[in-house]
Amino acid sequence: MDFYGLRKFCLVSGQFLLMNNLSEFIKSQAQNLGFDLVGIAPAQPLEEESFRLREWINRGYHAAMKWMENRMEEREDIRNYFPEAKSVITLAMNYFHGIANGDLKVSNYAWGDDYHDVVKRKLRKLLTNIQKVKPEVKGIACVDTSPVFEKAWAQRAGLGWQGKHTNLITRDYGSWLFLGELILDIELDYDLSFDEDLCGTCTACIDACPTSALSDYVLDARRCISYHTIEHRGGLTDEFKDQLNGWIFGCDICQEVCPWNIKFAQLSQESDFIPRTEITEKSKREWHKMTIDEYRRIFRKSTIKRVKFEELMRNINANL
Ligand code: B12
Ligand code: SF4
Ligand code: SF4
């Protein structure tokens, strides 16, 4: 270990000795790493959520996302995914940098670096720091792609509730947050689950969705612009060709109208999420003329690479 490594090690262990409580230590480390919210829940089965997921799939609401049919047992009981699991730490990062505008729009979650990389890097660092003070701890980091009900775990960890637009909403930041989890094989001090539903009688998201994809707390992906512009492979269906409402990657409408976002959104402090102006300030004409080389350059380390060049052009052309 070099001098700086040793200094860092002493700082991390010193903080732990001062606190003498692993859960508090984890939370303060998470904050130091740039996470905005953190909470901890015991690793127990999620029976109700699994029942609803099955119902969602039976109704065909997952459209062509066949992968949502897989690994059901792991989603239902996180111990089928990580057998030693005792605690699920949920971490959230605020990504808000404003509302998309212009003729052609990219959802604001995709303006900066790919969140999968940013959040995962921080989760791995957090695990390393935990292992510096408790070397025997085993854990795994998850962001988006693991068979984990991320919003349900966030709710169990006390971060917020799942709103009628189906995203996790928090009192401090609204819903403009990425979620990630660190699953550990040790017991920790647990937070209280967030059992309130603060949507009340509001239906702004349901009313604003231009394609009627939402009913109370349930999303039908077959009708969702976000699904069609990001997850749908091949040509757009005839029904959806004219319904993208200017969106070329993702859709933010139901979150833009949510009173919790209007009131409580805060600018993200994460430098990796600073918007790339080549994404936010392109004119219709410039999008239309984009070449594959430009696509490769602008979207280096970007989550927009989830769609191929041809698919992005498909979305752009459908909006012209
Ligand atoms: C599949 C998926 C999608 C699909 C389907 C969305 C969906 N709502 O399921 C599509 C492609 C459409 C999508 C879009 C988006 N996604 Co997405 N997606 C996922 C993914 C991979 C799985 C979600 C899932 O399990 N869906 C299955 C269905 C059944 O789950 P559900 O909608 O949560 O359903 C629950 C409710 O319907 C509820 N329910 C049913 N009936 C009732 C009744 C009552 C009274 C109540 C209270 C609840 C309730 O129970 C169900 C089960 O828990 C997660 C990552 C993960 N691993 O969790 C990210 C994730 C949910 N997505 C995320 C994001 C950012 C988005 C977009 C905002 C991106 C964009 N701007 O375009 C949009 C938002 C669209 C929307 N309104 O939800 C974030 C959300 C963060 C947050 N704050 O919640 C996640 C967590 C990724 C991450 N790591 O940050 N996504
Ligand atoms: S993301 Fe857009 S299309 Fe999908 S439910 Fe929300 S408003 Fe509707
Ligand atoms: S817009 Fe209203 S109903 Fe929809 S999630 Fe926000 S508070 Fe809930």
Image (tube, rainbow, N blue to C red):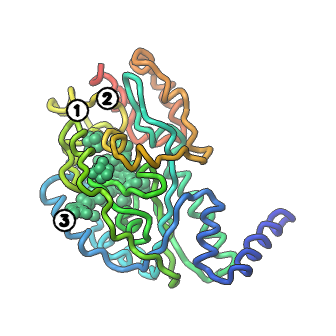
- Label 1 – label 2 distance at C-alpha: 8 Å
Tell me where residue 142 appears, x and y as whole percent: 46, 63
Looking at the image, residue 178 sits to the left or right of residue 71; the answer is right
Image vertical order of residue 65 relative to residue 238, above or below: below
**SS type, badge 1:** loop
Question: Quick one: 12 or 114, which is closer to the camera?
Answer: 12
Dot 2 falls on a residue whose secondary structure is helix
- Cα separation, mark 3 vs mark 1, equals 26 Å
Mark 1–mark 2 CB contact (< 8 Å): yes
Dot 3 beta carbon under 8 Å from ligand 1: no
Amino acid type shown at disc 2: Asn
- The residue where tag 3 is placed is 54
Q: Which residue matches tag 2?
A: 315
Q: Earlier in the sequence, mark 1 or mark 2?
A: 1
Q: Amino acid at mark 1?
A: Leu
Mark 1 = which residue? Answer: 236
**Can residue 69 be seen at all in this image of the molecule?**
no
Residue 55: mark: none
Q: Answer yes or no: is residue 311 visible.
A: yes
Q: Secondary structure at mark 3?
A: helix
From this viewpoint, which residue is outermost toward the left?
Answer: 59
Q: Amino acid at mark 3?
A: Arg
- Out of 209 and 240, give the one closest to the viewer: 209
